[in-house]
Image (cartoon, rainbow, N blue to C red):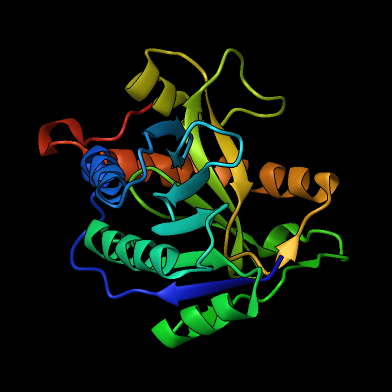
Amino acid sequence: MPWMELALNPLGDWDEEGLTDWAEALGAFLTERGKEIKTSLQLLPGYQILRMGEEQSAGELLISSSERLIVMMGLTVKNAGEREFAEMVTRFARQMGAMALRAPINYVAEKEFWRGLGAQDVLEPSLLREEIQKEKVGVEPLYKQSLLVTYKDKPALCLEPIFCTARPNGPVSLAARRLEKLLGGGRPIGFASRVSAYSPWEFERRKWDDLLAYSRLQAYEVLERLIIQSLPLEYSTPFNG
């Protein structure tokens, strides 16, 4: 399915804490226009889903905190009412501090509508055919504790720290041990992973696993720095082991 993305000029910092209020506001907007639609929020690692309606065909907004991106799912702009709602969502995204809004394109009229707002076509990712080269894998901070795995300096995967029942196979770095003491009282810490919306590639499972394996130790080090920087000064002295 083709997609278009509208770059936004956010009106402030990312306001994830206000998402519940925005969900209610969108529901009220629909109710005022004669659509009794119940909104609900589902929290997942690194993003939330704002569901509008209870049927299988209900529309959704996928809200990626780490990439400050809002994705419209199952929502069209075929008529004036839907276009008005899309413009409302655009204002909502900008006020939330989102950097971009992405929408699916099913009809020519939809493409014309989004193009009129300044949206650009999203290039389809292509299958990465080469083997992953370890030295070209990097890790960068995203929003809060989210991390971005890059390949050849381009976005690849988003990582979200999570508590686990067991440590992954392979060596455990000192940074990981320190994080376990700092955050979880010794509980193992791992990462939930998903492909970045801005990745130019699709990954076979084996190459996805390679990206995770090559980035894991570095990811713990970057996460440790982020956590320490967020602590009050008297708690920010790194552990010695």
Residue at position x 30%, y 35% in the image: 238
| Res. 184 image quadrant | top left
Q: Give the camera-side residue of 238 and 5.
A: 5
Residue lying furthest front: 34
Q: Position of residue 69 (x, y in %)?
A: 43, 59
Q: Is residue 71 left or right of residue 92?
A: right
Q: Is residue 229 visible?
A: no
Identify the image quadrant of the N terminus: bottom right
Identify the image quadrant of the C terminus: top left
Q: Give the camera-side residue of 167 and 147.
A: 147
Q: How many marks?
A: 0
Q: Position of residue 132 (x, y in %)?
A: 79, 58
Q: Is residue 132 left or right of residue 166?
A: right
Q: Is residue 232 left or right of residue 131?
A: left
Q: Is residue 187 above or below residue 172?
A: above
Q: Give the camera-side residue of 106 and 3.
A: 106
Residue at position x 34%, y 60% in the image: 89
Q: Position of residue 110 (x, y in %)?
A: 55, 75
Residue at position x 48%, y 78% in the image: 114
Q: Position of residue 64 (x, y in %)?
A: 44, 50
Q: Give the camera-side residue of 37 and 213.
A: 37
Q: Is residue 156 visible?
A: yes
Q: Is residue 238 above or below residue 74?
A: above
